[in-house]
Image: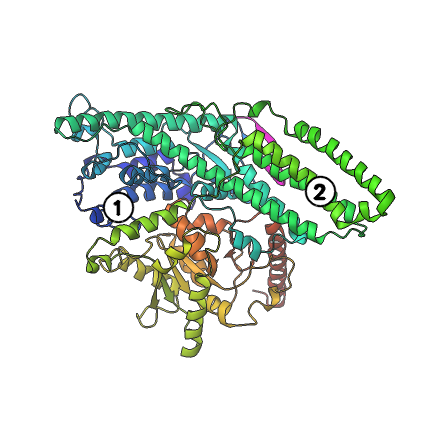
Amino acid sequence: MAARLSRSLPQVNRRVFAGLSSCAIPRIATTSARAGLVAHRNPWNLAPWTCRVIQASIARIFPYRFRLIGQTKCFHSGCYRLQRIEHHGETLDESGRNMDTLIELQAILHFMEFITHGILPNGKKTDLALLNPDEFPLFMAPSSQWAPAPFNKAALSTVQKAMERITGPEDLSGLCHVGSNIHFLKSRLWGGLAPVPASRWHEKDLNNPAHFTIALEYLTSVIAVFEYLNIPQIRTNMCDTFNKISGDFGEMQDALNARRKAQGGLSPDLNLSALWEQFIRARYKVMTSTAHSWVLARVAELRERTLDGFSANSAENAEAQWTFSRSGGATSLPADFNIWMSMDGYNGYNLPSEIIAGLHNPDLKNQDKDYEFSKLLFPRLAKCIEAQNEAAKVQGPSATQSDAASRERLSISTVVQDELRVKIRGQAPSPQPPVQPWVQQLLRAQEASLSMHPQDRHNYGFGLAIYRAALKFSDEQWERLQRDLEAHLSAWGDDVQRADELKPLLKLHWFDCKELGLDTTKPVTAAKRHYQQIRSSDEWNHKLAPSVFLLIDHMSANSYIDEKFHASFTNDKDFLKGDVHGHVLAVDADFDDSAIANGSADGMATEDPQDDDLKYPGLMRILGDLVWSELYPMLMLQSVGLENLWLQAREHSMKVYTGPTVPGQVKPWKGRNALKTLMMNSFVEFLKRKIPS
């Protein structure tokens, strides 16, 4: 690990890109189906040469740290306390740090897909000209190899130049250090995923007033992501990086248009710079609409749940109403004011004259949310209270103390917020978020496969390998476990558009360690070796996610079939509902630290789940119903790796990924772990005194 941390990103990137300029241009199939699937040679409809380069770069970015320049300043976002360093906008929190690419690196990959099929991240189709099938691989070769003069001067490929704009190596303005939970949430939003799916929110019982503090942390964490992205220096750096990439694509479009004319084709001229602007604008729109609509929906649910729980005669009623009113305003209004991705200064972006929610409001800086809110709220509230007091003279105390009266007073703040929202974000309400990009992507690939020969179509699919390493169970128990586990893995998507179309396409491919003759004393190591051998084979190359597989060890099996397994956690206030139930082991197939992988990894298959070493072990437990809804899309979008998910799981008593975490949720986990460590250390000291060495 130390050796990896000591490497510089520029050196790594040079090795990653070495030889790209001399790589052969792949042959592109001509039929639409093969252009959609066969030519890409992977189950996710991605070009393999692009995947390998971008995957390699992503895998190498996040372990590295840079010296950051400037003075530390602090600011607050609700329950989140962030720190930043001015030069690179470093943000920190107590859960660790990650190196963040301000414009996500996989944006280059997704842009390359977009200019071949024309579907924007929001599901709409561009009206601009797209690539011809034979032009795609030219992005991976320098123009000196294929472009007519005078456009044949570049020694680096366009994809290489664009990626280096984001990751360095000469300019680090496209990077910054950021707290791991903020980085993780930002990556989810970039990929169009909700911060916490609505079904998962309800499963965790976060609408319960008893969990209000943690729910508020989740809400403010989303706002904190956009506060981070709107730090002036961060925003400037993102704009500069975008514009540099736009310039690279402008050079590429000139070379391609010259090539088209030289070949005498009838294809219209390309405008890659305009396509790049259109793509990023749609991506930002998905980010902001997903985040904003999610916050408002959760606040509305909390409001209804809290109002339903109020008792007009309760001594705590006034305090509860005041707390809710203040905290509701502390999330709704900051969401309206902060969830923006300004594109001022982006090449090709035309500033609109009207308000565009999430992207542009020319008067936003001049609006004072506190003053406007108070100016509208207090006169109306005073008028309402006066009217209720007058009614009380006739009707009695119920006119001011009833639930209906309380609701009337509290509803005023909601009405005021809704009115201000129109002024802040425009007339139209926040739209329903579009179909998530990863769902769009898989369904497009499936549609493309329908025109293939059935025998060829059989070679493609969307799946995960899963190994049986738990052998101490009867056939009957194992059959029940498989049935329950597959049902649990399928229990997702109630709030995901078109999930019902996708679910039947997602497959688990089972492998039995014993039947395969693998070493069952070290199942993780043995399964990893087997998986590395089969994943690139003709049989499995297009059916399995290449970087992660699942494994069922005895702990995972017990989490599904042993009713006593979770008994000690059932009424434990340290855990939210749904944070302890059936789980599987996800293994990083490319994790190469053999000392940790062979020791800690296989050790996690024992009866003791606690691992005091918080270094990434190359694997992570994950709740079954999060496998297809979170693990798979994040791997497919290449937004984060397993190590980033593990950072959200490492404090859990059983190292289980339960979704994004917040400090209030993690704090009791840490307390439990510290107590266990103290008890273990005391026991070890006792043994040392009892049995001297």
Give the residue displayed 48% in from the left and 67% down from the top: 555
Residue furthest toward the top?
Answer: 150
Q: Which mark is residue 48?
A: 1
Q: Quadrant of residue 459?
A: bottom left
Magenta-colored segment: predominant secondary structure: strand
* Magenta stretch in the rendered image: 70-81
Examine the rendered structure and indicate whether residue 367 appears above or below residue 455.
Answer: above
Q: Position of residue 484 (x, y in %)?
A: 45, 69
Q: What secondary structure is marked by label 2?
A: helix
Write the residue at 61% across / 65% down: 570
Tell which of 512 and 639 is nearer to you. Answer: 639
- Give how far across and how far down residue 682 sits, in percent: 63, 61
Q: Which mark is residue 653?
A: none
Question: Is 404 included in the stretch rendered in magenta?
Answer: no
Q: Is residue 154 left or right of residue 584?
A: left
Q: Is residue 43 visible?
A: no
* Amino acid beneath label 1: Pro
Location of mark 2 (residue): 410
Q: Quadrant of the C terminus?
A: bottom right
Percent of width and height locating residue 74: 60, 31
Residue 162 or residue 590, whichever sits in front: 162
Q: Residue at x 78, y 49 (%)?
A: 402
Look at 30% across and 70% down and name the residue there.
516
Amino acid type of the residue tagged 2 in the rendering? Leu
Front position in the image: 623 or 11: 623
In the displayed structure, 27 sits above or below 650; it is above
Query: Do the numbered discs 1 and 2 sit on residues whose CB atoms are within 8 Å?
Result: no
Q: Categorize mark 2 by other alpha carbons within 10 Å: few (<14), some (14-19), many (20+).
A: some
Q: From where the camera sits, is residue 221 visible? A: yes
Residue 458, quarter of the rendered image: bottom left
In primary-sequence order, the first of circles 1 and 2 is 1
| Mark-to-mark CA distance, 1 and 2 | 56 Å
